[in-house]
Amino acid sequence: MTVPTATAPETLLAAPDQASQRQITGEIESLHAELARRERAGEDLPATVHDFPPYRSSILRHPTKSPKLVDPETIELLSPAFGQRDVAAVESDLTIQHAGEPLGERITVQGRLTDSWGRPVANQLIEIWQANSAGRYIHQRDQHPAPLDPNFTGAGRAITNEAGEYAFTTIKPGPYPWKNHLNAWRPAHIHFSVFGSSFTQRLVTQMYFPGDPLFALDPIFNTIWRQKDRQSLIGVYDHELTAPEWATGYRFDIVVDGPDATWFENESE
Amino acid sequence: MAVPPRTLRATPGQTVGPFFAYGVGYDRMHQVAHPHAPGTVLLGGTVYDGVGAPVPDAFVEIFGADADGVVPRRRGSFRRDDHTFTGFGRAFTNDDGHFEFFTRDPGARPGRAAFFAAIVYARGLPDRLHTRIYLPDDAAALAADPLLRDLAADDRATLVAERMPDGSLRHDIRLQGEKETVFLVF
Ligand SMILES: [Fe+2]
């Protein structure tokens, strides 16, 4: 067998077929309808589907075999340990990492990390990364011709407190184009990487902003095929979190799931 | 004791996208153990897609017990001090789809098979994938392992690393297609 040689990663970012938005939206709608039919017929489906062709780069990267259900062992029921001192306070404020202040709408994003029984997940790490207010990532492979902001990197970290709470101060990210199809734009979002109390609870997701007109058009958002699950990724504007003359506030609570064994593991700690 | 019903709906996962490197990268993240310390092993491999092309925008995380089989509970995974073993590491694939860790061979309870818990993330992968990377050395323990003994030989092989003559471990991850890695849900 000949092994294909590696291509420059940025050349992989554009889907070869460059379908129209109408075509992509149609594919999303028919997949959602098909998944709903399968669920009604009794199939147990995950919240995020791996096999989702409108997200073109998933076509060759999603597994085709059913995942194997397995009893977690000790290593999988525990998680790397963190403490408050592992992250400096400055790391949760993305607006003070440079000499000057970044441009854009200053916001706070706050929430609570819990397990699916509502128990707080304390002392765990949350990492975030995002585009700047113009929709540009600092990543070298982001070729979107929008300005970089010399005062904004767009990466932050926080450790949850005893109540599972976290808070970030940042700038509202802009939507950005990508090359999944013609005129493809991602709704504005912040990437979240979250550690639970158990390695089985590890979560990487994206938080969105209320009322974004791009929701229905975006194949990545719609890999989550149920409306109620997509809704849970949309931060909630909370005027109580808005600080006068300073920043608007959004709430984004995160629930990490795990097998039944994680219930016992955390009760015994 | 019975497990009470869940009261909250889990937050669904999403892809890491293409631009995760500056968000989740950190210094010496793949050095779970110091490269020159006694007992350190190199664990390396390549992530492949469905046509056998390397995946250059993926990352892999491992969490493993120490050599005595005890799961580390020490902090320091994100601030390496070169002597505290936390068991956790993260490695990005390079332009050839290759990832590598410096770590220790995890131990196991007597008679049990030793493995690293592993998670794969990539652009184009809508959600994370859990898997395991077993050490190949104890054939009897592998044969008795509750997960492996349930699998066909071809599938079992996708979860067991290869021990190279220099003592390092090689383990490729195939997201799709021929020799597709077995991924896990719990
Ligand atoms: Fe993004």
Image (cartoon, helix red, strand yellow):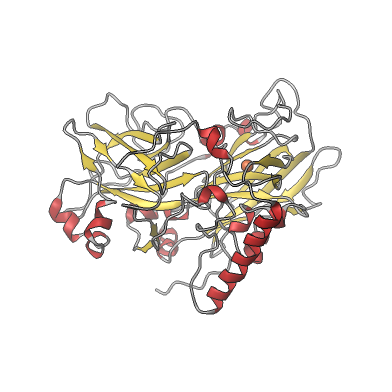
Residue A113 in the image: x percent, y percent? 58, 53
Farthest-out residue, top: A99
- x then y, percent, for residue A15: 58, 44
Say which of A106 and A123 sits in front: A106
The quadrant of the picture occupied by the C terminus of chain B is bottom left
Count of picture labels: 0
Q: Residue at x 38, y 34 (%)?
A: B98
**Ligand 1 quadrant assignment:** top right
Residue at x-position 52% and y-position 79%: A41
Residue at far right of view = A245
Residue nearest the viewer, comparing B13 with A261: B13
Q: Does any portion of residue A247 appear in the rendered image?
A: yes
Instruction: Judge whether A74 appears above or below B29 on screen.
Output: below
Q: Which residue is at the front of the view, A219 or A125?
A: A219
Instruction: Name which quarter of the figure residue A182 lies in.
Output: top right
- The image quarter in which residue B52 lies: top left
User: In the current view of this chain or complex, which residue is farthest to the left?
Assistant: B140
Which residue corresponds to the image point at 45% horizontal and 30% vertical from the top-left? B79
